[in-house]
Amino acid sequence: MKVADIMTRSVITLTPHDTILVASKKMKEHNIGFIPITDEVNKVVGVVTDRDIVIRGLALGKDVTERLENIMTTDVITINPDAELGTAAHLMSDHQVRRLVVTDGNGKLEGVLSLGDLSTQKESDTMAGVALSHISEISTDRESNPHHGTKVWEFPL
């Protein structure tokens, strides 16, 4: 089975010039936590998650008028719609992501494939479980968390 067979095609998008406030309202309105960021020709230039808004935006004191280009993730993990579901599960597992942006050969948005999409398919349910177990593993890379080992009362505010 191919990614195109189960991906979500109707995807809410924003532009790099939209703001944290606009993204937050879209997320609330559509009950989502992930929005691809596209340019004027629908090429994917980033993604914004609810976590990006909190960690890279609000927690750093940025205002809700801050542009998404300043907080979005630009290293987007993408997949072609003709790829096999097993390939998608491996990508999710290897990169510890729950969603893949589906793009054509020119980087234009075609859809989104989520871990939930994989788990609804009988033949890929096991792959989704394996991917989830790898995604959910606690990172052993202490350098990725500068506050690892900090006691709650010592945490910088």
Image (spheres, rainbow, N blue to C red):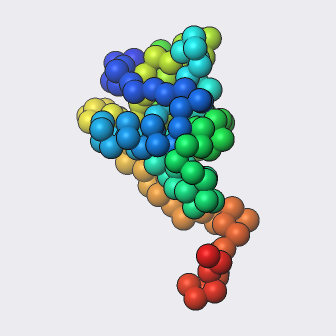
Q: Residue at x 64, y 35 (%)?
A: 69
Vertical position of residue 153 compared to residue 17: above or below: below
Residue 63: image location, x then y, percent: 57, 51
| x, y percent for residue 139 | 60, 62
The residue depicted at 54 percent of the width and 64 percent of the height is 138
Q: Quadrant of the C terminus?
A: bottom right
Q: Is residue 24 left or right of residue 42?
A: left
What is the x, y in percent for residue 42?
A: 54, 15
Q: Nearer the viewer, residue 43 or 28?
A: 28
Quarter-of-image position of residue 114: top left
* In front of the other: 104 or 73: 73
| Residue 154 placement (x, y as % from top left) | 63, 86
Which image quadrant: the N terminus? top left
Look at the image and tell me whether residue 31 can be seen: yes
Q: In the rendered view, tell whether residue 126 sits above or below residue 11.
A: below
> In screen coordinates, is 145 left or right of 112?
right
Which of these two is toward me, 14 or 103?
14
Please give the count of numbered marks on the rendered protein.
0
Which residue lies at the image location 58% right of the left edge and 14% below the top edge? 40
Residue at the image position 63 percent from the left and 59 percent from the top: 60
Residue 91 visible in the current orientation: no
